[in-house]
Image (cartoon, rainbow, N blue to C red):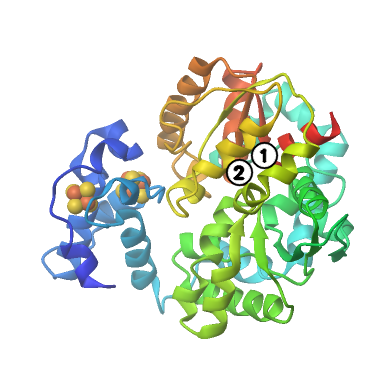
Amino acid sequence: MDYVKLINCMRCGMCLPSCPTYKETFLETASPRGRVALVRKIQEGELDPSERLLEYLSLCIDCQACASACPCGVNAGELVAEFTCERKAGSRLGFMEELVLRKLLPHPDRLEASMAPMRLYQRMGLQKLVRTLGILKMFPKPLARMEGLLPDLPERPLRRVIKEDMPARGEARGTIGFFLGCVMSLIFSDASRATIKLLTLLGYRVITPKNQVCCGAPNMLAGDLEGLKTAARKNVELFGGVDLDFIVTDCGGCGAELKKYGHHLNDSSSASFSGKVRDISQVLAMHADALKLLLRPLPLKVTYHDPCHIAHCQGIRREPRELLKLVPGLEYRELENADACCGSGGTYNIEKPEMADLILRRKLDTIRATGADVVVTGNPGCLLQLKKGLIDHLPQVKIMHLTELLAQSIEA
Ligand code: SF4
Ligand code: SF4
């Protein structure tokens, strides 16, 4: 860990109001400033990494709102993640971590096969039965939580059904490598289908290599830096074999991780890969004039939730809003604290359900205040978390991925 990053904190406290865990606890140890101080004291040998202390650090949801607020460029979320990686380096992964991070995620076929029972569970009507009868209460809590978050799955994962090479329609602009995130392919396939459609309509040939693997973000979350590097090498090699203008993703979490491959692998090919990565909103906004000609009226009141991985990690805030405002008839309503976390945080909402629910409640209050019909966002974790929250508390409000809404406007 770079010690300088730790001592850069001047303890001004400007990050405190933007930290979701501090807002809920008012504990210094659950604030960015406190977390930087704890990691620093451990590094300096003045504190032992006790269970309790590690628990405080693990309460960080890694939203990186603190980085956006800090005048000194300190990123407490990233420092905690790096500290966790260093602490775990060399130690064996637990059984479940080994299974998920090493045996499933790096192998798309196995990952897809592992979802087949869930699809069957939904198709046979068991999910409806389980939910209606309240049987979920008898499940272990994390399992019940995961089941509660699971939306209707598509018939087949998108990776299985899309063409690897989709030609541009109309005047050709260039070639895009599409990074299809695991959750987007397995759960939000309509959104990624819409992404490919928008790109081809705007004149891009879209290549989606079927052998691409998970971006490695779950490895990073679990402190498994080696697993992340293995995934990164595979993806860099795969996409490096094609001449591409951009590497595009419609998953905020994947985009944030792919842009860090250059940092993690520290070589020229990974730096070139990361340099080409764009969130879908960035590429669509580049062609706003052409896109505007395709859009038809959608009389909806729409608000936008900034995913942490898009706003704080990638600094993208303007483009999604500009794109929504292009849709004729759409009334855009700004969300208060739009870039405040929704409580998803990868698997945080399963591991720390109480805190995740408190954070979600704040987000739902601000959505209610907008009076919007639809919340738009750009990250599958936020889609899952908000979908569940809206069904439970604001069932009249729908949630959509940005590309789904734009494709709907084109088809309107
Ligand atoms: S992390 Fe940044 S904003 Fe927070 S106390 Fe330190 S210097 Fe101030
Ligand atoms: S990453 Fe988020 S939760 Fe963690 S310290 Fe920063 S603002 Fe707080």
Report the residue at 49% width, 43% height from top.
Answer: 317
Q: Amino acid at mark 1?
A: His
> What is the distance, in whole Å, between disc 2 and disc 1 at their CAs?
5 Å
The relative height of residue 161 versus residue 232 in the rendered view (above or below) is above
Residue located farthest toward the left when viewing the structure as drawn: 46
Image coords of residue 289 (percent x, y):
69, 43
Q: Is residue 221 left or right of residue 160?
A: left
Q: Which quadrant would the C terminus be assigned to in this image? A: top right
Q: Crowdedness of circle 1 by 10 Å Cα count: few (<14), some, many (20+)?
A: many
Q: Is residue 225 left or right of residue 379?
A: left
Between 55 and 15, which is closer to the camera in this rendering?
Answer: 15
Image coords of residue 36 (percent x, y):
22, 56
Q: Amino acid at mark 2?
A: Gly
Report the residue at 23% width, 59% height from top.
Answer: 50
Q: Crowdedness of circle 2 by 10 Å Cα count: few (<14), some, many (20+)?
A: many
Report the residue at 81% width, 40% height from top.
Answer: 121
Residue at the disc numbered 2? 378
Q: Is residue 213 left or right of residue 308?
A: right
